[in-house]
């Protein structure tokens, strides 16, 4: 979801089969605000245009904690997954 500084929803981007900056650049036009996206390096140029702000995707961040939990590497994984679950519950409640 793309939100401006005033929190109004701009739209929802579903990328085409190919990943390239030209697709979101064309879709967003001269829009500016906070762009929630994954860490694909090709999107860095998209964020730089029109003073856009980048925000990471929580689902992608959650995967890293899930890997820690499943690998038994760190107790932080379980705590992070639990906290993210609370955020998801709040989002569901707020609709």
Image (cartoon, helix red, strand yellow):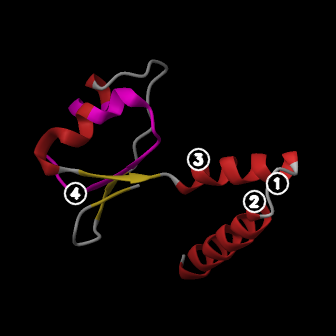
| Mark toward the start of the polypeptide (1 vs 2) | 1
Q: Position of residue 5 (x, y in %)?
A: 22, 68
Q: Earlier in the sequence, mark 4 or mark 3?
A: 4
Vertical arrangement, residue 31 with respect to residue 24, above or below: below
Is residue 40 inside the magenta stretch?
A: yes
> In this rendering, which labeled residue sits more in front, label 4 or label 3?
3
Q: Are marks 1 and 3 in contact (CB under 8 Å)?
A: no
Quadrant containing the C terminus is: bottom right
Identify the residue position indicated by label 2 in the image.
77
Residue pictured at 31% horizontal, 27% vertical: 23
In this view, 74 is above or below 89: above
Nearest-to-viewer mark from 1 and 3: 1
Whether 33 is drawn above or below 14: the answer is: below
Q: Which residue is mark 4?
A: 33
Q: Quadrant for the N terminus, please.
A: bottom left
* Residue located beneath label 3 in the image: 60
**Label 2's element?**
helix
Q: Quadrant of residue 6?
A: bottom left
Instruction: Please report contact status of discs 4 and 1: CB closer than 8 Å, yes or no.
Output: no
Residue wearing tag 1: 69
For residue 37, what is the image quadrant?
top left
What residue is rendered at 79% in x and 64% in y? Answer: 78
Q: Name the front one of labels 4 and 1.
A: 1
What range of the chain is rendered magenta? 24-44
């Amino acid at each position: 979801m793309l939100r401006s500084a005033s929190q109004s929803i701009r739209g929802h981007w579903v990328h085409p089969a190919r990943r390239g900056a030209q697709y979101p650049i064309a879709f967003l036009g001269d829009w500016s605000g906070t762009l929630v996206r994954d860490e694909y390096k090709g999107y860095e140029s998209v964020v730089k245009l029109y003073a856009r702000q980048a925000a990471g995707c929580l689902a992608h961040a959650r995967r890293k904690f899930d890997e820690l939990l499943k690998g038994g590497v760190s107790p932080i994984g379980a705590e992070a997954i639990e906290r993210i679950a609370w955020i998801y519950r709040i989002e569901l409640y707020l609709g």
